[in-house]
Image (cartoon, rainbow, N blue to C red):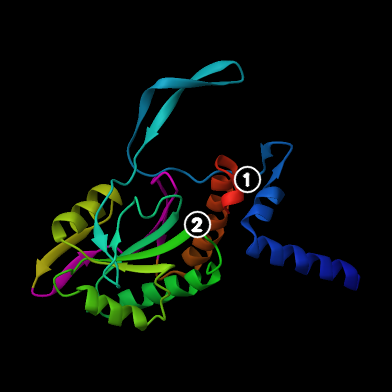
Amino acid sequence: MSKSNVLKKIVILALILALPGFLYYLLTAKGKNRYDPLPYFGPKELAKTSHIVKGKSIPDTIYHNISDFNLQDQNGKPVSLKTLTNKILIVNFFYSNCPNLCNQVNQNISKLAAEYAHNKITKFISITVDPQRDNVATLKQYSNKFNADSTRRLFLTGDTSVIYPLARQGFLVNALDEGNGNFVYSDKIMLIDESHHIRGYYTGTSDDDMLRLDNEIKVQIAEEIRKNDHSMY
């Protein structure tokens, strides 16, 4: 392979990583997508509306989505789905007094977040399942362990009456206080699209799953670009 061809491939790879709009261009041709959209997770139902595909009427599907919530980040700022408009969310649950598992998952997320530091539509969010201990000040100190940029990487706290139903009914994962400082929570990371649908689950301690999450974030970025105004990216 000539040096010029190698250089061209390096430039193309750099553009894919840096510019979601360029990724979208590569993944589409003449209006036809060359990738499979990610699946939707959770319960679904048929809507009363429909759309036409190849001359046939196909019922629309109503997919499970995340309900709005009101929490606080590590700087004490309010966070809700309204403050996260037009964002792809990468979400996990944890608690600061957790043994090594939480730290490993959050470290993996922080590495991934660094790769998307210049991408405007991705937000990485970690929600504590122990809000009585993990107040704003505690989360601020905890976030410093990961050199978290609070514009990109949020650690959230609030009331258990919000957090536990949000985990179980919204993200469809476990969150439970067993007492004596023991908590049941999921090690899964969730990928949420701009419409607040769950598009993927990933084991936060698995290198293979973290690689898959990285790839599927790119696929989801391409989907959002296709659906929305390209200039906003």
Residue in the image at 57% along x and 56% along y = 218
Residue in the image at 26% along x and 69% along y = 76
102 to the left or right of 116: left
Q: Which mark is residue 121?
A: 2
Residue in the image at 62% along x and 56% along y = 20
Q: CA distance from mark 2 to mark 1?
A: 20 Å
- Camera sees residue 174: yes
Q: Secondary structure at mark 2?
A: loop
Give the magenta range: 180-203
Q: Is residue 12 above or below residue 143?
A: above
| Quadrant where the N terminus is found in the figure | bottom right
Q: Is residue 44 above or below residue 229?
A: above
Which amino acid, by three-letter code, is at mark 2? Ile
Q: Which is in the foreground here, disc 2 or disc 1? A: 2
The x and y percentages for residue 206 are 44, 69
For mark 2, does the 10 Å Cα neighbourhood hold few (<14), some (14 to 19), or many (20 or more) residues? some
Instruction: Please count the marks in the image.
Output: 2
The x and y percentages for residue 6 are 83, 70
Q: Identify the residue under disc 1.
A: 35
Residue in the image at 37% along x and 24% along y = 47
Question: Closer to the N terminus: mark 2 or mark 1?
Answer: 1
Q: Identify which residue, 178 or 220, lies in the foreground.
A: 220
The x and y percentages for residue 163 are 21, 58
Q: Quadrant of residue 157?
A: bottom left
122 to the left or right of 141: right
- Camera sees residue 98: no
Residue 1 included in the magenta stretch of the image: no
Q: Is residue 67 above or below residue 162?
A: above
